[in-house]
Image: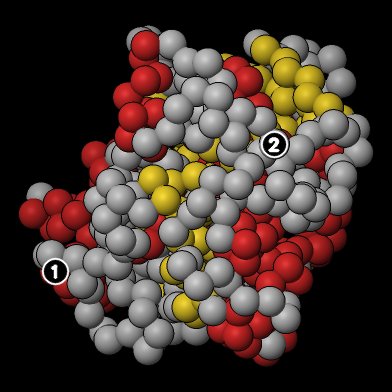
């Protein structure tokens, strides 16, 4: 019988099938951050329960931490310091590995888990954060959970849940210069709708997926939750194995790893509940125009005709049907997040910013995805390119991505951003976020209005 990649990993972790249709799965690794992890650990302590296998649990401080350069050991968020101190206390009490603010391994959970080799092909991995699906880029079954499920998994290393359906998205064609995985996923979500992936585990496949670097694969999988999906996964290949090699928590038995990874693929005859074929050859840079990810369009298009349900989004964005996206004046630019805050993203943006200045009216912020990304970028001189262009070069964290670190743009500012969500107020009170790829953010920051790397005139 033929199976999908997700089927195979699911079966290898299946402990029990319940009469109600749910399954009990073994959870290999758990990642915690201070915003939800501290709460789950505190709840365990209240119930006098312990962590089943402390060596399989990893913690970071990323969500509500200050990202200002030379940040203090504090949170600007009201009550944020309590979460940070609670995480430190509980991690120590349960003997869990914590990547604290003074650690060179600190960073956004979905960035440092691959960096440290904590995610591995074929593993099951959870975190109480919806973008945990990012790590499916390495052929792992990784998904976000609520704090109740997180607490259960911490105490038992298992989780009761319903198996998702299988969807395959085949990317075909040739990537054009200046077009990236971020543009592809924005195009797919806008074409099919933000809830089209509900109940599915998505496998990204096809030749245009296989040629992507690991960072771009992570971007694709990261945004799967914006499609409504349970998670996303990509068949691990030599590129994934090489990327994870010699990472701190990677196994050191190469032969055993490669033999195992070689079995992680969807069988040729495997049946998917839905398949989508998407050719990237004619793809253009995409940018969001509304307050939902599926409200996105090619950068050189006009804001499309909307129905009544979408009018509040246009009102919030203070835009009208028929307005060109290209040339829309911006007040801010942001590069960072678990979607596009990796070294490759910073290199691409720096290539555009080198020797240029950000427009005087634009507040430009760069937040590297981890302390390691920041250090490596500084070693390459990327920080100087950003700073000389007029960007603020910050410490790693999630704060500017979802207005939880106490920093934001001016009230009502129009911002082009490499993040993954453009909900109302996501980056601050009345801030209007236009999601785009890092290249588009950098090019727009320089000119002071929405543009792309490929755009010659407006």
Of the two numbered discs 2 and 1 on the same chain, state the one appearing first in sequence.
Answer: 1
* Residue 453 appears in the figure: yes
What residue is pinned by disc 1? Answer: 82
Residue 70 appears at what percent x and percent y? Answer: 37, 89
Between 16 and 425, which is closer to the camera in this rendering?
A: 425
Kindly identify the residue that appears in the image at 42 percent across and 41 percent down: 422
Q: Is residue 81 left or right of residue 438?
A: left
Q: How far apart are marks 2 and 1 (CA)?
A: 46 Å
Residue 231 appears at what percent x and percent y? Answer: 54, 34
What residue is pinned by disc 2? Answer: 300
Q: In this view, does 256 lie above or below 23?
A: below
Q: Which of marks 2 and 1 is in front?
A: 2
Numbered marks: total: 2
Q: In which quarter of the image is the N terminus?
A: top right
Q: Is residue 172 left or right of residue 40?
A: right
Mark 2: secondary structure: loop
Q: Is residue 221 above or below residue 297?
A: below
Mark 1 crowdedness (10 Å alpha carbons): few <14, some 14-19, many ≥20: some
Kindly identify the residue that appears in the image at 60 percent across and 85 percent down: 388
Residue 342 image-quadrant placement: bottom right
Kindly identify the residue that appears in the image at 86 percent across and 42 percent down: 175
Between 238 and 426, which is closer to the camera in this rendering?
A: 426
Kindly identify which numbered label has been placed on residue 103.
none
Residue 162 image-quadrant placement: top left
Mark 1: secondary structure: helix
Residue 222 appears at what percent x and percent y? Answer: 56, 44
């Amino acid at each position: 019988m033929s199976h999908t990649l997700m089927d195979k990993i699911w079966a290898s972790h299946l402990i029990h099938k319940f009469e109600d249709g749910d399954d009990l799965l073994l959870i290999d690794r758990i990642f915690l951050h201070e915003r939800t992890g501290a709460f789950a650990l505190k709840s365990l302590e209240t119930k006098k329960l312990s962590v089943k296998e402390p060596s399989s649990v990893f913690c970071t401080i990323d969500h509500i931490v200050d990202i200002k350069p030379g940040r203090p050991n504090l949170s600007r968020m009201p009550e944020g310091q309590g979460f940070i101190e609670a995480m430190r206390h509980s991690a120590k009490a349960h003997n869990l590995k914590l990547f604290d603010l003074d650690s060179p391994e600190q960073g956004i959970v979905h960035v440092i888990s691959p960096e440290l080799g904590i995610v591995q092909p074929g593993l099951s991995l959870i975190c109480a954060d919806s973008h945990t699906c990012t790590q499916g880029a390495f052929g792992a079954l990784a998904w976000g959970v609520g704090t109740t499920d997180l607490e259960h998994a911490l105490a038992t290393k298992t989780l009761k849940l319903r198996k998702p359906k299988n969807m395959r998205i085949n990317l075909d064609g040739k990537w054009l210069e200046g077009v990236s995985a971020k543009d592809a996923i924005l195009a797919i979500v806008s074409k099919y709708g933000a809830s089209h992936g509900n109940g599915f585990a998505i496998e990204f496949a096809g030749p245009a997926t296989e040629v992507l670097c690991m960072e771009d694969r992570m971007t694709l999988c990261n945004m799967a939750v914006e499609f409504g999906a349970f998670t996303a996964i990509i068949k691990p290949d030599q590129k994934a194995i090489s990327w994870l090699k010699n990472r701190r928590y990677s196994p050191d038995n190469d032969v055993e790893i490669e033999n195992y990874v070689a079995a992680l693929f969807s069988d040729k005859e495997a049946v998917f509940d839905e398949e989508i074929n998407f050719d990237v050859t004619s793809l253009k840079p995409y940018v969001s125009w509304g307050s939902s990810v599926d409200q996105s369009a090619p950068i050189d298009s006009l804001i499309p005709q909307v129905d009544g349900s979408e009018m509040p989004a246009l009102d919030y964005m203070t835009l009208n049907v028929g307005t060109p996206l290209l040339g829309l004046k911006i007040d801010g630019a942001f590069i960072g997040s678990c979607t596009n805050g990796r070294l490759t993203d910073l290199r691409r943006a720096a290539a555009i910013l080198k020797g240029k200045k950000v427009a005087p009216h634009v507040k430009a912020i760069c937040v590297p995805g981890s302390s390691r990304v920041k250090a490596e970028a500084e070693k390459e001189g990327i920080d100087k390119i950003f700073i000389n262009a007029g960007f603020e070069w910050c410490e790693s964290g999630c704060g500017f991505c979802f207005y939880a670190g106490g920093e934001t743009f001016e009230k009502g500012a129009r911002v082009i951003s490499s993040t993954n969500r453009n909900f109302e107020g996501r980056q601050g009170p009345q801030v209007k976020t236009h999601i785009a790829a890092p290249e588009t953010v950098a090019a727009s920051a320089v000119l002071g209005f929405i543009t792309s790397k490929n755009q010659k005139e407006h």
